[in-house]
Amino acid sequence: MSTLQTDHLLGIKDLSRAEIELILQTADQFKEVINRPIKKVPSLRDITIANLFFENSTRTKLSFELAEKRLSADVINFSASGSSVKKGETLIDTVNNILAMKVDMVVMRHSSPGACLFLSKHVDAKIVNAGDGTHEHPTQALLDAYSIREKLGDVEGKKVVIVGDILHSRVALSNIFCLQKLGAEVMVCGPSTLIPRYIHELGVKVETDLRKALHWCDVANMLRVQLERQDDKYFPSLREYSMLFGLDKQLLDSLQKEIVIMHPGPINRGVEISSEVADSEHSIILQQVENGVAVRMAVIYLLAEKINRS
Amino acid sequence: MQSLTLLNDQQVQLALRRLARTLVENHDRFEQTVLLGLQPRGIHFCERLAAEIRSIIDAPLHVGKLDITFHRDDFRRHEEPLKASPTEIDFLIEGKKVILVDDVLYTGRTVRAAMDAMLSYGRPENVELCVFIDRRFSRHLPVQADYVGRQVDSLQSEKVSVKWQATDGKDEVVLFTSKGSI
């Protein structure tokens, strides 16, 4: 396969294994590009991309913007604070106004699940989902798979546990789809109140004991507790959460085996992961950030290839 | 499709030896000179050329592979999607003499992209171009090779294919002509 079947990247659920592998292979080439003395290629010099961030983001926004600039695309940025959204403009109106300025691709983060799908049906531009509410965050899952492949050689047959707030996490859902399509076994682990009731229907194992989960896995992806999305109390206190589901050096050492530690960021040090573990040699958190740029370059490049010139 | 053999294995070998000797004549012991084969087809020619050079001089020779996909000027204009190949350059080209190596010089666009891609790695002192087949009178850009294995006059509808022992089973240069085009 040398081209994507899909016209937009809305979620991992829509991608085939071959498409995911094409993105990862293309990212290999871009990883080499971003390690050159001059880290920029001219491929997308006639493409304009709008980054619409209706929800806060540091890493993803910077990573997308850097990826776009490394490909020589023209970039316009938009964030909901300080925009007309506050004056009551609808999503379609906002986007159509931006498209009227001749934009070819839209990278969007929005707090409503399905916002990107909705947009893809109503506007004439390639849409890349940079996170839609609690639904999907496809580029994060792709960069996680890329980082596992880079560290362990392959994703096929690996055992990955996703720990934390599964209920509110778009990273968890995209990771489950992506890892399963690439042939990994996936387990979710967290307080039972933060695990969706029917998640086993996706074919993932469910575990509420962190120690058992860590003994089983090759890779542990530690997620942040998304307090901003929690409209209810799901556990008694952060301190109790940290004692039961936080990963510290003592727990890691007691496993007597090597596991790879991942975190999509932002880290709440001392809650889901201790500083010692986050900064240890087991952690590939900063490699994930570097790979994020390469993977996003691959996604944008492959989608841009499908933009009709006429 | 009719095919015509332009060079057989002996002629390929002769041309390779001649190119290697000319390069050694101009670059002595290759202390300040590096070879960059262009992906995907130029790297096989580059490897063969490097082997010939090594048989003449006993000195370390820097050989790299350069992929030009992201620097091409036909992104989104190509019928088939472009597929990138790895770039492998494990030496510095800053201040060096670089010889770009490709199998066929046709429109000159690949070489233009290669010079662009190469500059991402540093500023060479000078750059030369070595090609095995030069299809004359078909250039879109003002690009000429410094070292040429064989010049070929061909029509735009024809295709020149360079085959190598290691990848295609034998050394050969073939001209393909679609029927009725002449």
Image (cartoon, helix red, strand yellow):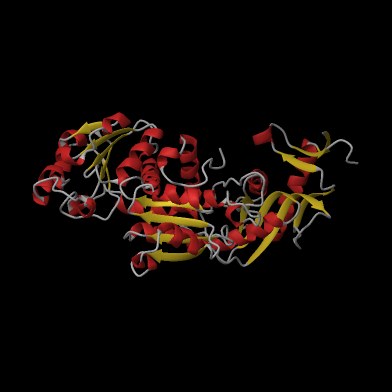
Does B141 sit above or below residue B46? below
Q: From the image, which quarter does the N terminus of chain A lie in?
A: top right
* Picture residue at 51% right of the left edge, 49% below the top: A29
Left or right for A99, reference A188: right
Does A4 sit above or below residue A285? above
* Picture residue at 41% right of the left edge, 55% below the top: A108
Residue A175, given in percent of the width and then of the height, sits at 34, 41
Q: Is residue B28 visible?
A: no
Left or right for B83, reference B106: left
Residue B156, given in percent of the width and then of the height, sits at 82, 48
Name which quarter of the figure residue A215 lies in.
top left
* Picture residue at 26% right of the left edge, 49% below the top: A281
Q: Residue furthest bottom?
A: A82
Q: From the image, which quarter does the C terminus of chain A lie in?
A: bottom right
Does B52 sit above or below residue A158? below
Q: Is residue B45 visible?
A: yes
Left or right for B161, reference A277: right
Out of A92 and B55, give the one closest to the viewer.
Answer: A92
Name which quarter of the figure residue A151 lies in.
top left
Residue B36, given in percent of the width and then of the height, sits at 61, 53
Out of A143 and A80, give the one closest to the viewer.
Answer: A80
